[in-house]
Amino acid sequence: MKVILKADVKGSGKKGDIIEVSDGYGKNFLVKKGLAEIATASGINEANQKKAAAAFHKAEELKAQQALAAALNGKTVVVKIKVSDNGKVFGSITSQHVAQALADMGFDIDKRKIKMEASKTLGSFPAEIRLMENVSAKITVSVEAL
């Protein structure tokens, strides 16, 4: 018996998969609990269209993130911070400061995607922006006195 899964079923498959199961397991467990529906020609066609649409959207998202990574790669972000008379920095530069500086440059990047070590001195430091799996950009953070 062929069924289309409506939810992830451990050991059987993920939501949207079309799988072959025994009649008893399909009717008495999967369909009865609402985890699957019996596969019909229209249901199979609809499931295949949903998978194709999801793959298309994922490819478009990947293309957009790669373009953003190319635009960011090699950029220098200037972050200004308050310092004392002898050059000691008050506080530290965190990913929040870098995200704000990137927003001022026109890039909307979440602070959790910026990987860097918190800096407590003036100068330039490398940082990595991980936009998604296998897509990242390397930038330079320049810390200057306010």
Image (cartoon, helix red, strand yellow):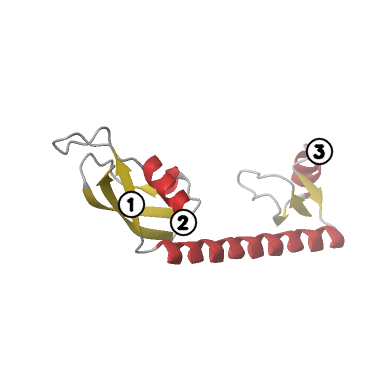
Q: How many marks?
A: 3
Q: Residue 114's spot in the image, x, y percent?
A: 39, 48
SS at mark 3? loop
Quadrant housing residue 62: bottom right
Q: CA distance from mark 3 to mark 2?
A: 38 Å
Q: Residue 44's spot in the image, x, y percent?
A: 79, 60
Q: Which residue is the site of mark 3? A: 32
Q: Which residue is the site of mark 2? A: 133
Residue 134 visible in the snapshot? yes
Q: CA distance from mark 2 to mark 1?
A: 27 Å
Q: CA distance from mark 3 to mark 1?
A: 60 Å
Classify 10 Å Cα crowding around label 1: few (below 14), some (14-19), many (20 and above).
some
Q: Amino acid at mark 3?
A: Lys
Q: Amino acid at mark 2?
A: Glu
The residue that appears at 41% across and 59% down in the rendered structure is 136
Q: Dividing the image into 4 quarters, which one contains the C terminus?
A: top left
SS at mark 2? loop
Disc number at residue 8? none
The residue that appears at 71% across and 53% down in the rendered structure is 16
Q: Dividing the image into 4 quarters, which one contains the N terminus?
A: bottom right
Q: Which residue is the site of mark 1? A: 78
Q: Which callout, 3 or 2, points to the residue nearer the camera?
A: 2
Pointer 3 with pointer 2, Cβ within 8 A: no
